[in-house]
Image (spheres, grey):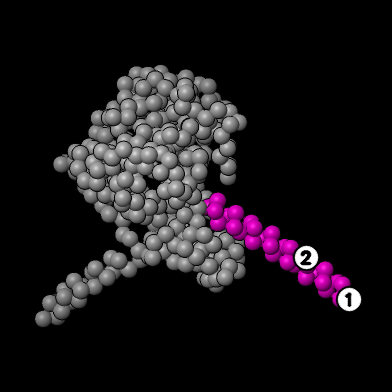
Amino acid sequence: MKKILVLALTLALAPVLSFAGGPPAATQAGIESKDYKWNAQEGEKIEALKLKGTAKEGKEGYEVCGACHLPSGAGRTDGTFPQLAGQHTTVLIKQMADIRAGLRDNPTMYPFAKELTDAQELANVSAYIESLCIPIDHGRYEGADAAKQIADGKTMYEKECIECHKANGEGVKDKFYPVLAGQHYKYLLRQMTEIRDGKRRNANPDMVTIIKKYDNAQLVAISAYQSSLVMPGSMCKAGAAKPAKKK
Amino acid sequence: MKLKLFLAAGIATLASSAAMADGAALYAEKTCIACHGKEGKKPMIPAFPKIAGQNAAYIELQMRDIKSGARANGSSAAMKGVMVNPEGVELVTDKDIKDLALYLSKLK
């Protein structure tokens, strides 16, 4: 009898408890699961991908994003917030949908991903972000051995990363492979480490297979090289764009 | 005497308005504004608190606890992410916390 009462109470309280402190982040089985299928073409993502986004319309919606990612899209040089400007709409939409669905764990981004539910707005904001020039004052590898790290990283990058992320780090839009040029060194290193270690649960298993054999020191070199990449025609002109505020 | 008092009051006002400007800059720079809205009055969603005019001591305590992980309920995880980065690097210092708490407590 007592057991039943406790059970009934627990059941009654469960929904209350889970909503007590704001939106609990969702979780969905990702790469740790046997049934995981990368970039499954389902859910809200499809709708936003099909719609044509208008950059001009997305400018207003981006204002909220700009509080962390900055109006220029530059994010933070310390890698806390990624650089977004010039990123493919496909990548932006997929990552937003994945965070929202609980496939990519990011408690800070989650409340925002959860709010942006309108597929047309998501398409517009993504189009706006994609239209921005890539800032050139991003975080890079700053060690005294930068030249050597970049050279070592280049060798490794050209061996295995280049096929998908391309020579200038431009990625492949219709395959959801992100632009890497202009990204912060520390952000790149963190994401690669998390993808290798299975912590980024929406990762592409093909990439996990490739990256598994690289140790921390090698990932440092690869990130150093990636953050030195330049995409001709897509970068902001020196002095033209408002420099991202540092610290 | 009167002049002295007036001057002192003037300096105090200047100092406090400078502190308010610093607080407002910190509030934007540390990304508080994204969730709690302009001047802590317009949270993005109802589950986030309005913080304008809250007691400085209370704000300071909650911020410290969220930063250290002592408070981890509700949306604390979202806020912790802007206070300490995934590598454990401090993004909001204890001095920042004090300044932000004072700034927010003075907003009406």
Question: Which range is magenta?
Answer: B1-30
Looking at the rendered structure, whether the residues under marks 2 and 1 are on a common chain is answered as yes
| Residue position marked by numbered label 2 in the rendering | B11
Q: Is residue B41 above or below residue A41?
A: below
Q: Chain of mark 1?
A: B
**Magenta segment, prevailing SS (helix, strand or loop):** helix
What is the three-letter code of the residue carrying label 1? Met
* Quadrant showing the N terminus of chain A: bottom left
Q: Badge 2: how crowded within 10 Å, few (<14), some, or many (20+)?
A: few
Q: In the depicted view, which residue is nearer to us: A202 or B72?
A: A202
From this viewpoint, which residue is outermost toward the bottom?
A: A1
- How far apart are the two marked residues, 2 and 1, measured between alpha carbons? 15 Å
Q: Secondary structure at mark 2?
A: helix
2 or 1: tag closer to the N-terminus: 1
**For residue B1, which numbered disc appears in the image?**
1
- Residue A147 can be seen in this image: yes
Determine the residue positioned at 47% across, 54% down.
B34
- Residue B57 can be seen in this image: no
Q: Secondary structure at mark 1?
A: loop
The answer to which quarter of the image holds residue A162 is top left
Residue A63 place in picture, x, y as percent:
46, 49
Determine the residue positioned at 75% across, 67% down.
B12
> In this rendering, would A152 be left or right of A175?
right
Residue A64 place in picture, x, y as percent:
45, 51
Q: In the depicted view, which residue is nearer to us: A228 or A64?
A: A64
Q: In the depicted view, which residue is nearer to us: A53 or B62?
A: A53
What is the three-letter code of the residue carrying label 2? Ile
Q: Chain of mark 2?
A: B
From this viewpoint, which residue is outermost toward the right?
A: B1
* Quadrant showing the C terminus of chain A: top right
Q: Is residue A89 above or below residue A14?
A: above
